Image (cartoon, grey):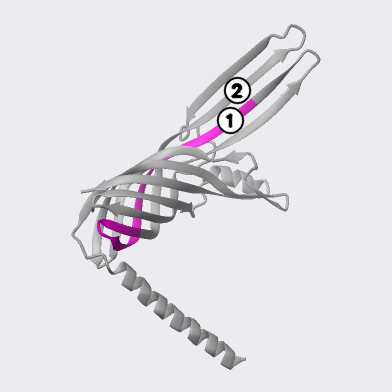
Amino acid sequence: MKKICFVVLAFLSCAAIAGAQDFRSMFGTDQKGSLSYGVRAGYNVSNFYGHVFYGGKKESLGENISPFSGGHIYGIVDIPVTNGFYIQSGLGFSSKGSAEKYKDVQKSDGYYSRDVDLYAEVPFYLEIPVLASFRADVARNVNLQVGVGPYFAVAVGGRSYDIDNGSGWDRNDGERWHWHDVESSPMFSKDGNRGISRFDTGLTFTAGVTLFRHYYAGISYDIGLNNIMNRKALAQLIEAGGAAYMHNGTFSISVGYTF
């Protein structure tokens, strides 16, 4: 058994070394450049994910939670380390958040109404990513990039939205009616914060391509590692015998220009 394990480990070690050599060979085709700067902007699709523990049961945050659309803009700096390897950092703004949608049909003898309530929390973060960026010239004027690393964020603002939409009709006279009501409040005011912490950290994964050394297009995904439920809301839940873990998850599409 020990001999089999040794053979397997030796095989995996050789495969890992060969894979690493291929990886270095591929991403070593990019020549070490000079310090450069750029801008990135684009579209976000974000959501909260996690679990709530209460009464001895584990439940997801809610089946009604749905993604929320937003955007981002960054100034970035590329620091060359060696051929094919850069440190990419910068500073930017990114909107994240999530929405909860509830539908209700109310009936009576004379009419029925359909009510759709949408509650959304949309924090705006100031973020600093620090990415290990690997690059390869895969064709003339085409540079492939992949990156991974942590991000550090603090919410500098945000809004909570409570949107109520409904419609109904009277069976007796056929009269129809509609309503639309929107309430908005700042998230981080005394009355506006519904339980979100200002601080977040996580991991960013990116993949993209630069054309003609200047024009960038790519995608990324942020996995929040910090429990963003604020201390007061979490303490109240723990006092009641429960616990909760809530994290940001954000998919982004970006375009940009490198100077």
From the top left corner, tell me how far across and down residue 41 is, in percent: 34, 42
Q: Amino acid at mark 1?
A: Leu
Q: Quadrant of the N terminus?
A: bottom right
For mark 2, give the secondary structure.
Answer: strand
Which picture quadrant has residue 109? top right
- Depth order, front residue of 185/170: 170
Q: Which mark is residue 31?
A: none
Residue occupying the point 44% across, 35% down? 158
- Depth order, front residue of 39/97: 39
From the top left corner, tell me how far across and down residue 149 is, in percent: 39, 59
Residue on which the image places disc 2: 165
From the top left corner, tell me how far across and down residue 21 is, in percent: 36, 77
Q: Is residue 73 above or below residue 9?
A: above
Report the number of discs.
Answer: 2
Indicate left or right for 109 with 125 as reference: right
Is residue 147 visible in the rendered image? The answer is: yes
Residue occupying the point 21% across, 65% down? 32
What stretch of residues is rendered in magenta?
116-145
Residue on which the image places disc 1: 118
Hey, which residue is sitting farthest left in the picture? 34
